[in-house]
Image: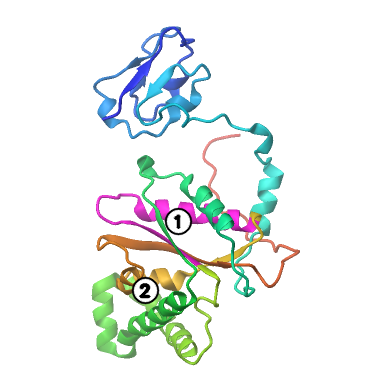
Amino acid sequence: MFEISIDPNLCKKDGLCAMTCPVSVIQQPQKATTPVISEDHLSHCFGCGQCVSICPQGAISHSNYPEGTVHTIQSDLVPNYDSLLELIRSRRSKRAFKNRTVEKEKLEKILEVARFAPSGHNEQSTEFVVIQDQAMIHKIGKLTADGLKKLALPFKSPIGRLIMRAMIGKRGAEYVGELAPEFEKLASMYDNGTDIILHEPQVLLLFCADSVGGTFAGTNANIALHNVALAAEALGLGCFYTGFVVTVSERDDSIAKLVGLPETHKIYGALAMGYPQIKFRKWPERNPAKATWIGEY
């Protein structure tokens, strides 16, 4: 359990901490009074840092955030909406990479962005495997190709399709069944020397987490992955989501074992990365947002 205290001499009684606490650990029963720590709710604190971040006077002490771990936002570095939108619109999946090593400093910057991704209940559950060894990347490509062949195999017979329907449901079986010919083709091309699974990247970044007790593990990993995709763009790198690696990893642990993950850990996301051979100078339109508006504006 965390220890939280409020210095009444520094507190301005504005109640900002009480308003931002997501689980009502900090409460302000009356306006213009010093907020109090609810002993009944203290055990629910998950150390999100909202209280220490919102207090302008630094009146709150939290055992999860000792001195030196709370920093002032540099507002002049925060991009405006137009800058952020242009980055998002211009980011594209890149699958052709230069034979150029990605500097460790850039990979460390990418991990810095990844660790600040939001996570459910502040679990910060996502762990990362950064693979630059080309032999290891090739082995992962091979395991992925073999896994795709295994996925496609049951759909070659009526009995296999019935079994898969019982195992993963009607909709799941129909979806995978439609992709089965593509799985076989991709695997065959890989076996014949054409890698359109990983596209020979300089880096393969896996997003992993302990699957035991982590309610939001998969969601957390993919939020971190999206942060990384944008950071890679800003750093002049290219990347794409290697969905086939994730698809195979959902059904067997061969890749997880290869990279040395603990038994209960799973791979929830993966990005192939490197310096792109090409640069996009245009972005195409997307479909309009499908939104239901409830209420009047």
Q: Where is residue 109 in the image (x, y as percent from the top left)?
A: 56, 51
The magenta stretch spans which residues? 204-233
Residue neighbourhood size for the residue with mark 2, other residues' Cα within 10 Å, grouped as few (<14), some (14–19), many (≥20) = many
Q: In this view, which residue lies farthest toward the bottom?
A: 192
Q: Which amino acid does label 2 sit on?
A: Val
SS for dot 1: helix
| Separation (CA) of disc 1 from disc 2 | 16 Å
Q: In this view, does 202 lie to the left or right of 266?
A: right
Along the line of sight, the residue nearer the viewer: 276 or 189: 276
> For the point 33% across and 90% down, which residue is it?
156
Q: Can residue 20 be seen in this view?
A: no
Tell me the tag on residue 248.
2
N-term mark: 1 or 2: 1
Q: What residue type is labelled 1?
A: Asn
Q: In this view, which residue lies farthest toward the right?
A: 281
Q: Position of residue 292 (x, y in %)?
A: 53, 47
User: Mark 1 — residue?
Assistant: 222
> For the point 35% across and 44% down, which residue is it?
123
Q: Position of residue 295 (x, y in %)?
A: 53, 36
> For the point 36% across and 12% down, which residue is it?
29
Residue neighbourhood size for the residue with mark 1, other residues' Cα within 10 Å, grouped as few (<14), some (14–19), many (≥20) = many
SS for dot 2: helix
Q: Can residue 29 be seen in this view?
A: yes
Q: Is residue 217 magenta?
A: yes
Q: In this view, does 136 lie to the left or right of 36?
A: right
Does the CB distance between marks 1 and 2 fall below 8 Å?
Answer: no
Q: Quadrant of residue 24?
A: top left
